[in-house]
Image (cartoon, rainbow, N blue to C red):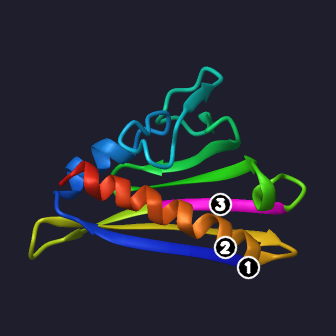
Amino acid sequence: MGKCYNSTVIDAPIERVWQTIKNFHDLSWDSAVVTSTDKVGSKNSDEIGAQRVLNNAFHETLLSIDNSQFNFTYSIDDGPGPVAKDAVQNYIGKVKLSPVTDSNSTFVEWSSSFDSTDPDEVADFCNPIYAGLLASLKLHFS
């Protein structure tokens, strides 16, 4: 099983960061990595089964969302290169927020697990994307 992991600390309270990141259909806070977000189907952004297509390439489905624990999971159902449906299986991404109490800031983790015949290729592809997303999120609150 392959894995990816990226994290950062954002200088904003967890409730503010969660309000921004929890909307599965809105990544407007990130124009550096995500150039387009298209909602697929009729499910709202906070409903299990909500779907989106990022950059006309990444087909994703919301698997869980927990407002009290500040996290959500999603699958990549198809995508380019190493995350194409015939190259990777069981791709589960997770975004988790935790409070940093001494500074009223937020620790954000973006991770994933997946099955692939070349897990290093998937990690080399996805880790820079997650790092870019976290950098954009951090910039959004600066």
Q: Quadrant of the N terminus?
A: bottom right
**Three-letter amino acid code at disc 3?**
Ile
Cα–Cα span, label 2 and label 3: 13 Å
Query: Dot 2: few (<14), some (14–19), or many (≥20) neighbours within 10 Å?
Result: many
Q: Position of residue 31 (x, y in %)?
A: 42, 42
Q: Position of residue 104 (x, y in %)?
A: 11, 66
Residue indicated by mark 3: 92
Q: Residue furthest front?
A: 32
Give the SS element for disc 2.
Answer: helix
The answer to whether residue 70 is seen in the rendering is no
Residue indicated by mark 1: 120
The answer to the question of whether label 1 and label 2 lie on touching residues, with beta carbons closer than 8 A, is yes
Q: Is residue 85 left or right of residue 96?
A: right
Cα–Cα span, label 3 and label 1: 16 Å
**Residue 86 located within the stretch drawn in magenta:** no
Query: Dot 1: few (<14), some (14–19), or many (≥20) neighbours within 10 Å?
Result: some
Q: Which mark is residue 1?
A: none
Q: Is residue 42 above or below residue 50?
A: above
Q: Position of residue 140 (x, y in %)?
A: 26, 49
Residue indicated by mark 2: 123
Q: Which residues are magenta?
A: 88-95
Residue sitting nearer the eye, 117 or 46: 117
Q: Earlier in the sequence, mark 3 or mark 1?
A: 3
Q: Is residue 48 left or right of residue 45?
A: right
For image coordinates 18% across by 54% down, the residue present is 142
Tell me the quarter of the picture where residue 62 sits. top right
**Three-letter amino acid code at disc 2?**
Ala
Query: Dot 3: few (<14), some (14–19), or many (≥20) neighbours within 10 Å?
Result: many
Q: Is residue 141 left or right of residue 117?
A: left
Tell me the quarter of the picture where residue 99 sits. bottom left
For image coordinates 69% across by 51% down, the residue present is 76
